[in-house]
Image: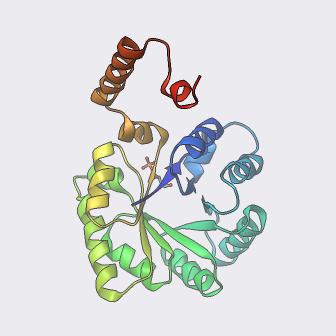
Amino acid sequence: MRILLDTANINDIRYFNEYYPIEGVTTNPTILSKEKGNVIENLSEIRRIIGPEKELHVQVTETSFDRIIREAEALVSTFGKNTFVKIPVTDVGLKVTKHLSERGFGVTVTAVLTAAQGMLASNAGASYVAPYISRSENLCADGIGTVADIAEIFKASGSATQILAASFKTAKEVLDVAVAGCHAATIGSSIMKMLISHTTTDTSIQGFERDWRSAYGSSTLLELLEGK
Ligand code: E4P
């Protein structure tokens, strides 16, 4: 399952883009509102950090068909190829999705809470549907099950739409959507760290370092290899 970073924090994006195998960055109006400064400059900086090939998902804020289309055109012309226009799953959103996808835009239909919404978004031509996991589970609904259902529906219909699961509160949810057949997940910085962290990994590494030092002192393997 491919992983994207769900933040607009420049320091976090710089860090995770350097060290982690992330394939892009996703934002929404709430995520953007948490960062100081000019929003266009911040998004341009994100694009500069991740480069032109990785995905940048930016959500529209307009609500009428004509203005969403203008906003989508402006987003792609400002932030370049591999910019995906995030559109909430509404009646207007479906119409916009059909129109933009027919014109070759990448569209991510977001705020998906049910498999039915995911199916409609796919039929409208969405590149991605973004089911919200924790927002679903918080309502005692089965967010992971929704991803599994969407995966089944897409498989049965031969849909080219990919599932980009979002809204995670635990690392376990990320693994669960991967097992459920999800194509991609967008994850906040703290959960990204949880995915790699393990105390036994830390103590194992400490043990390797201790055993090396007790056998070879301050000599490093690299120095020995290079004959120093
Ligand atoms: C994707 O970008 C979604 O908008 C985001 O994951 C929602 O996350 P939240 O439910 O934690 O706000």
Where is 149 relative to 124, above or below?
above
Query: Can you say which quadrant of the picture contains the C terminus?
Result: top right
Could you say which is closer to the camera, residue 185 or residue 217? 217
- Total marks in image: 0
Where is 12 relative to 81, above or below?
above
Q: Position of residue 101 (x, y in %)?
A: 58, 82
Residue at horizontal 28 percent and vertical 46 percent from the top: 172
Instruction: Find residue 80 and report its image quarter.
Output: bottom right
Q: Position of residue 17 (x, y in %)?
A: 59, 46
Q: Is residue 182 left or right of residue 125?
A: left
Q: Is residue 30 visible?
A: yes
Residue at horizontal 37 percent and vertical 74 percent from the top: 117
Q: Is residue 195 left or right of residue 70?
A: left
Could you say which is closer to the camera, residue 103 or residue 179? 179
Q: Position of residue 225 (x, y in %)?
A: 52, 31
Instruction: Find residue 182 and report its image quarter.
Output: bottom left
Q: Position of residue 98 (x, y in %)?
A: 55, 84
Where is 202 relative to 210, above or below?
below
Query: Can you say which quadrant of the picture contains the N terminus?
Result: bottom left
Residue at horizontal 63 percent and vertical 41 percent from the top: 14
Extreme residue in the front direction: 227
Q: Is residue 143 visible?
A: no
Q: How is the image coloured?
A: rainbow
Instruction: Find residue 176 and report its image quarter.
Output: bottom left
